[in-house]
Image (tube, rainbow, N blue to C red):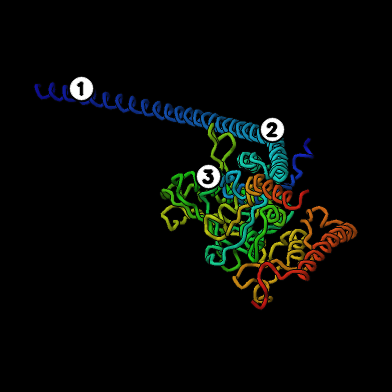
C-alpha cells in the first residue's frame, strides 16, 4: 500500500469534457436536427462570429462550408456523439451561421392514396 | 565653700556625662557590628535564594521547552498520520473519479444519439467537480496529482479547468492557439485555474461573467482571470498573497469544519511545479484579477498534435471542389450540383482502425471503391441518356 500511494495516476479521459464543448446547452427537441437532416454553412455568416466559435464548432463549420452534409455525417467526421453535434448545430443556427434542410417527413413521402390512384390508373390503361 | 561644692558637682556631672557618652558609643559600636553581621548574613541568604530561584526558573524553562517540543511532535505526528490516512483515502477517490470520468465519456459516445445524453453530461459535470475536490485534498496532504501524459493547448487546459466548477458557463475564454502546455504542467495548471475560477465564481454574482484571457509577457505566459465580484480589501490581499506563496500552508487541523483550501492548494502546487499566482490585481470590472504566470519551462509555442489519425481521413475523403476551382459545379441558379466524387466517399473510419496496420485501410478502400464504382456507373449512365435535370452547363 505504501509503495502504491506515491505512484501517479494517469488520466485517460479526454481533456475537454463533452459538457464543456456544448457549454451546458441542452439537447434540442427530438424532431430537430435529425440524423438525416442536411446542414450547410451560411454564406453570409460574419467572420467575426465564426472566429469566436469553439474549435469543435469551427470544425463543424469547416466540414459544411462547401455543401450540404447530413447531421450523421458531421457527427462521424468530427468524432463527436450525435447529440453533441445536434447541440452545436442548434447554437450555430441560433447564431445564423448555418442553413438547415429538414428531412422529408415519412408521412409526406408515402402518400398511399396518390400511389394507389396512380396504380389504378395504370391498371385501367394497361389492363394488368 | 560653695564654689568647691559647685566644682565637685560639676565634676561629678562631667564624669557622669563622659561615662554616659562612653557607654552610648560602646553601645552604638556594638549595634553597628551586629547590623553589619546581619546585613552580610541576609545578603548571603538572598544570594542563595536567588541562585535557587534561577535554578528553578531554568528548570521550568527546560520543562516548558520539553513540553512544547512534545506538543509540537505530537501535533506533527498527528498531522502526518492524518495526512497518511487521507493520502490513502484520496488516492482511492482520485482513481475512482478518473475511472468514472473515462466510463462516462465512453457511455456518452456510445449513446450519443439518445436523449439520456443530456443527463449524462450533467453527471459528467458533477464528477468533474468531485475530481477537483479529490485533487485538492491530494495536494493538501502531499499526495501526487493525477497527471496527463500528453501536452495540450493552453486553451483546452483552461476549458478543462472550466468544467471543474459549478457555474461553468459563466466562464468566457479568449481563443488562443499555438501555445501548448507541456504534459507535466497540464494537470497542475488545470487544477490551479479551476480553483481560481471557483473563487471568482463564488465571490461574484451568480450571473456575472468571468473572463479568461492569455498574455505573453517576455518569456512568461499569463493566464488572466477577471471576475466582476466585490474585490478584496488590503487585509484579504495580504492573506491571499501569503497563502499563494506556498510557504505558509495551513495545517489540515486548522482548516475547520468547512475547509476552504482553494488558495492554499493553488499556492502549494504553484510552488511545487514552479509557476506563480497573483490575485492582488483589480479586474476591468472592479473585481479580482487573478494571474497565473507560467515560466517558459512549462509551455512551448508548438501547435499541439491534434490527433492526426482523426484528421487525416476526413481531409482525404472529403475533397469538395471550391467554387473558384470548378465554376460549373453550380447551376445557373447558383444551386450546388451533384457531381462525380473525386474520391470514394468512405464511411467514416473509426479511430481505432485508422491508427492500425496497413492492411485494414487497404481492404476497406477496396470495398468502398466498389461502391464508388457503382455510383460512378449510375452517374455516367444518367449523364449519357438524359440532359442534366439540374441545369445544363451552357444554359
Q: Secondary structure at mark 3?
A: loop
Which residue is at a point 72% across and 54% down the rendered structure image?
A76
Which residue is at a point 66% across and 78% down the rendered structure image?
B394
Q: Chain of mark 1?
A: B
Q: Which residue is mark 2?
A: B85
Query: Which of A123/B352 is in front?
Result: A123
Which numbered circle lies on residue B22? Answer: none
Which numbered circle lies on residue B12? Answer: 1
Q: Earlier in the sequence, mark 3 or mark 1?
A: 1
Look at the image and tell me whether residue B185 can be seen.
Answer: no
Which residue is at a point 78% across and 53% down the rendered structure image?
B350
Q: Earlier in the sequence, mark 3 or mark 2?
A: 2
Say left or right for B52 vs B323: left
For the N terminus of chain B, the image quarter is top left
Look at the image and tell me whether residue B382 can be seen.
Answer: yes
Q: Chain of mark 3?
A: B
Q: Secondary structure at mark 1?
A: helix
Gap between marks 3 and 2, in whole Å? 32 Å
Query: Which of B384/A19 is in front?
Result: B384
Q: Which residue is mark 3?
A: B167
Amino acid at each position: 500500500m505504501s509503495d502504491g500511494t506515491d505512484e501517479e495516476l494517469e488520466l485517460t479521459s479526454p481533456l475537454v469534457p463533452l459538457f464543456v464543448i456544448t457549454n451546458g446547452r441542452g439537447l434540442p427537441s427530438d424532431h430537430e436536427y435529425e440524423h438525416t437532416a442536411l446542414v450547410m454553412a451560411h454564406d453570409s455568416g460574419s467572420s467575426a462570429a465564426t472566429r469566436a466559435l469553439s474549435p469543435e464548432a469551427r470544425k463543424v463549420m469547416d466540414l459544411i462550408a462547401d455543401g450540404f452534409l447530413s447531421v450523421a455525417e458531421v457527427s462521424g467526421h468530427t468524432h463527436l456523439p450525435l447529440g453533441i453535434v445536434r447541440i452545436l448545430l442548434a447554437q450555430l443556427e441560433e447564431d445564423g451561421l448555418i442553413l438547415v434542410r429538414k428531412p422529408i417527413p415519412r408521412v409526406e413521402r408515402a402518400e398511399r392514396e396518390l400511389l394507389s390512384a396512380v396504380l389504378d390508373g395504370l391498371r385501367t390503361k394497361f389492363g394488368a | 565653700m560653695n564654689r568647691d561644692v559647685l566644682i565637685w558637682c560639676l565634676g561629678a556631672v562631667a564624669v557622669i556625662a563622659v561615662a554616659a557618652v562612653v557607654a552610648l558609643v560602646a553601645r552604638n559600636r556594638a549595634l553597628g557590628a551586629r547590623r553589619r553581621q546581619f546585613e552580610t548574613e541576609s545578603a548571603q541568604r538572598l544570594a542563595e535564594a536567588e541562585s535557587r530561584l534561577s535554578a528553578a526558573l531554568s528548570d521550568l524553562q527546560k520543562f516548558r521547552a520539553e513540553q512544547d517540543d512534545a506538543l509540537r511532535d505530537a501535533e506533527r505526528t498527528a498531522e502526518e498520520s492524518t495526512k497518511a490516512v487521507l493520502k490513502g483515502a484520496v488516492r482511492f477517490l482520485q482513481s475512482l473519479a478518473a475511472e468514472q470520468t473515462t466510463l462516462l465519456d465512453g457511455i456518452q459516445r456510445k449513446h450519443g444519439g439518445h436523449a439520456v445524453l443530456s443527463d449524462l453530461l450533467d453527471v459528467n459535470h458533477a464528477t468533474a467537480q468531485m475530481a477537483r475536490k479529490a485533487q485538492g485534498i491530494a495536494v493538501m496532504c502531499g499526495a501526487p496529482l493525477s497527471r496527463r501524459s500528453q501536452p495540450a493547448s493552453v486553451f483546452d487546459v483552461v476549458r478543462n479547468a472550466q468544467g471543474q466548477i459549478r457555474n461553468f458557463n459563466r466562464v468566457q475564454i479568449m481563443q488562443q492557439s499555438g501555445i501548448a502546455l507541456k504534459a507535466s504542467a497540464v494537470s497542475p495548471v488545470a487544477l490551479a485555474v479551476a480553483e481560481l475560477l471557483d473563487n471568482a465564481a463564488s465571490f461574484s454574482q451568480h450571473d456575472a461573467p468571468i473572463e479568461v484571457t492569455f498574455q505573453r509577457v517576455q518569456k512568461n505566459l499569463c493566464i488572466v482571470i477577471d471576475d466582476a465580484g466585490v474585490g478584496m480589501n488590503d487585509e484579504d490581499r495580504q492573506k491571499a498573497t501569503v497563502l499563494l506563496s506556498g510557504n505558509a500552508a495551513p495545517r489540515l487541523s486548522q482548516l475547520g469544519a468547512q475547509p476552504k483550501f482553494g488558495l492554499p492548494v493553488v499556492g502549494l502546487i504553484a510552488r511545487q511545479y514552479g509557476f506563480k499566482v497573483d490575485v492582488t490585481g483589480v479586474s476591468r470590472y472592479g473585481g479580482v484579477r487573478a494571474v497565473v504566470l507560467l515560466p517558459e519551462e512549462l509551455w512551448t509555442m508548438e501547435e499541439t498534435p491534434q490527433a492526426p489519425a482523426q484528421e487525416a481521413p476526413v481531409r482525404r475523403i472529403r475533397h469538395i471542389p471550391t467554387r473558384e476551382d470548378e465554376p460549373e459545379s453550380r447551376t445557373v441558379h447558383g444551386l450546388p450540383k451533384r457531381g462525380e466524387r473525386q474520391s470514394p466517399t468512405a464511411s467514416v473510419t473509426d479511430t481505432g482502425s485508422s491508427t492500425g496496420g496497413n492492411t485494414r485501410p487497404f481492404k476497406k478502400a477496396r470495398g468502398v471503391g466498389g461502391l464508388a464504382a457503382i455510383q460512378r456507373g449510375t452517374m455516367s449512365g444518367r449523364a449519357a441518356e438524359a440532359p442534366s435535370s439540374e441545369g445544363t452547363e451552357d444554359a
